[in-house]
């Protein structure tokens, strides 16, 4: 079931996303959080840090599991998702660093790293709340449109649409990694609740395709329609066609 929340401005967007996460932690301080990168959740993380500083939320007993990571970027590379998470959230709250998990994108044996991440997820039990951004091609995590989708964590070749969209964060397109490691669609859909976030007019069409179109591997986000509890947080521009 999809519950659509359409907000009027950036502040409401961030407040709504942060409140959902904070109220989960207030009820279940040991929650398993599934976290996402990309520009969309940055303001939500900022607001969460404020709530933490105001003493309204604590992460000290929580666990976090990130969706994905580029292959071949060292952990301290400015664009690695491990560094992104440290800088945008983890360094500013009381989460225990050993409880923060990001797939390893520079392991010697990447297949093994994917299997290890799967085992970690299985041992963790279910993710209580999985945050998701939405790629312009309908990707969630780095599950790109394809003939077939994979259930568990795996290695993917990035779509040119994705590399071009993310080139803005690198000096040139040549520096954008060609591969990534990502939680699969199966792992994502196992979460108890999913928070899909999208902002801006450029996400309107793909969002409507994902949520109202047919289920298809050509739009991985379309499988969210099969989940029992998805909150879709959008601004007016992204939600225009819903
Ligand atoms: O939030 P943004 O920057 O629009 O990105 C959307 C999606 O694309 C990615 O940045 C990867 O291309 C994901 O991490 C994110 O979910």
Image (tube, rainbow, N blue to C red):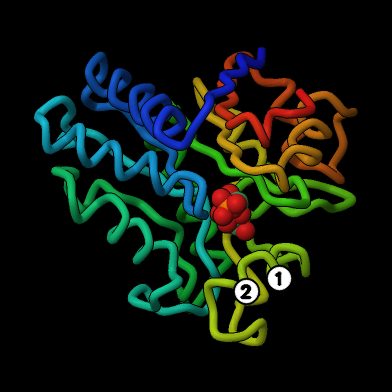
Q: CA distance from mark 1 to mark 2?
A: 5 Å
Q: Quadrant of the C terminus?
A: top right
Residue 20: x, y in percent? 38, 22
Label 2: state its secondary structure.
Answer: helix
Asked where in the image residue 18 lies, by quadrant, the reply is top left
Mark 1 nearby-residue class (10 Å; few <14, some 14–19, many ≥20):
some
Query: Residue 26's quadrant in the figure?
Result: top left
Say above or below: 5 vs 38: above
Residue at 74%, 22% in the rendered image: 225
Q: Is mark 2 within 8 Å of ligand 1?
A: no
Horizontal arrangement in the rendering, residue 180 relative to residue 137 (left or right): left
Q: Secondary structure at mark 1?
A: helix
**Badge 1 vs badge 2, beta-carbon distance below 8 Å:** yes
| Rendered position, 157 above or below 209 | below
The image quarter containing residue 75 is: bottom left
Q: Position of residue 213 (x, y in %)?
A: 87, 28
Q: Which residue is mark 2?
A: 167
Q: Where in the figure is residue 211, as x and y percent of width and height?
A: 76, 27
Q: Is residue 153 visible?
A: no
Residue 160 horizontal/vertical position (percent) = 78, 69
Residue 105 visible within the image:
yes
The tag on residue 73 is none
Vertical order, 23 against 108 (above or below): above
Provide the residue designation for mark 1: 164
Residue at image coords 61%, 85%: 172
Instruction: Identify the residue shown where x is 49% and y is 63%.
Output: 113
Residue at image coords 60%, 66%? 180
């Amino acid at each position: 079931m999809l519950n659509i929340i359409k907000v009027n401005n950036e502040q409401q967007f961030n407040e709504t996303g942060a409140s959902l996460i904070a109220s989960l932690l207030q009820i279940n301080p040991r929650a398993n959080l599934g976290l996402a990168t990309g520009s969309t959740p940055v303001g939500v993380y900022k607001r969460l840090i404020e709530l933490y500083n105001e003493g309204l939320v604590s992460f000290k007993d929580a666990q976090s599991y990130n969706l994905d990571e580029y292959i071949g970027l060292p952990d301290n590379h400015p664009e690695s998702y491990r560094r992104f998470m440290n800088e945008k959230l983890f360094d500013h709250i009381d989460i225990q660093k050993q409880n923060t998990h990001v797939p390893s994108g520079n392991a010697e044996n990447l297949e093994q790293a994917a299997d290890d991440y799967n085992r970690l997820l299985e041992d963790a039990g279910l993710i209580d709340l999985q945050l998701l951004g939405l790629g312009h091609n309908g990707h969630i995590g780095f599950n790109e449109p394809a003939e077939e989708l994979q259930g568990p964590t795996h290695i993917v070749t990035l779509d040119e649409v994705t590399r071009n969209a993310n080139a803005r964060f690198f000096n040139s397109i040549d520096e954008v990694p060609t591969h990534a490691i990502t939680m699969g669609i199966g792992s994502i859909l196992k979460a108890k609740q999913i928070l899909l976030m999208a902002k801006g007019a450029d996400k309107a069409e793909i969002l409507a395709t994902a949520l109202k179109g047919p289920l298809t591997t050509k739009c991985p986000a379309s499988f969210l329609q099969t989940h029992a509890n998805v909150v879709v947080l959008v601004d007016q521009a992204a939600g225009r066609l819903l």
